[in-house]
Amino acid sequence: MAPPLKQVPSAWRGAILVCGKCSKKLDGGFGKKAQTPLAKLLRKLLGLGKGRKATLGVVETRCLGLCPRGGVALIDGRAPGTWLVVPQGADVAELAARLATVRTVPADQA
Ligand code: FES
């Protein structure tokens, strides 16, 4: 019999998946100098904590299979039915505000 799974608590209310390969193709592509990766800028603008103490996880992933030209593929884990493509140089503050306002489901009601 396999040992029981270990459970680790987290403050995350959702997870944002950002394609790291798209970001690499754009050499960052966001911020003042257009050199900051989208995930890093989102974490900064959302003022999230670190690791599992953050209220929202922003995770850079491998290729998501969408591979948009001149943009970065992003999935909001709270609304996985609609994937987003963030064009290079887009207003990330606007995106951060949008992601911050999505209603989250408390862990005990999920
Ligand atoms: S390279 Fe980003 S989705 Fe494929």
Image (tube, rainbow, N blue to C red):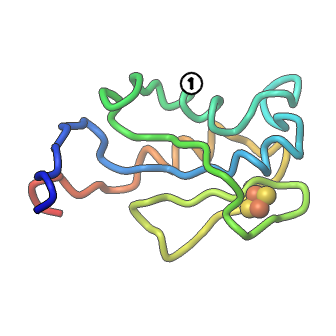
Residue drawn 90% across the image and 55% down it: 70
**Secondary-structure class at tag 1:** helix
Q: In this view of the protein, which residue sits in the foreground, 20 or 6?
A: 6
Q: In this view of the protein, which residue sits in the foreground, 39 or 62?
A: 62
Residue position for label 1: 44
Which image quadrant: the C terminus?
bottom left
User: Residue 25: percent from the left, percent from the top?
Assistant: 88, 46
Name the amino acid type tagged 1: Lys
Is residue 37 toward the left or the right of residue 93 in the image?
right
Q: Tag count in the figure?
A: 1
Residue drawn 33% across the image and 35% down it: 55
Outermost residue on the front side: it is 1
Which image quadrant: the N terminus?
bottom left
Outermost residue on the bottom side: it is 81
User: Residue 40: percent from the left, percent from the top?
Assistant: 63, 30
- Is 26 situated above or below 85? above
User: Residue 24: percent from the left, percent from the top?
Assistant: 83, 41
Q: In this view of the protein, which residue sits in the foreground, 85 or 27?
A: 27
Residue drawn 32% across the image and 56% down it: 103
User: Residue 50: percent from the left, percent from the top?
Assistant: 41, 23
Q: Quadrant of ligand 1?
A: bottom right
Quarter occupied by residue 92: top right
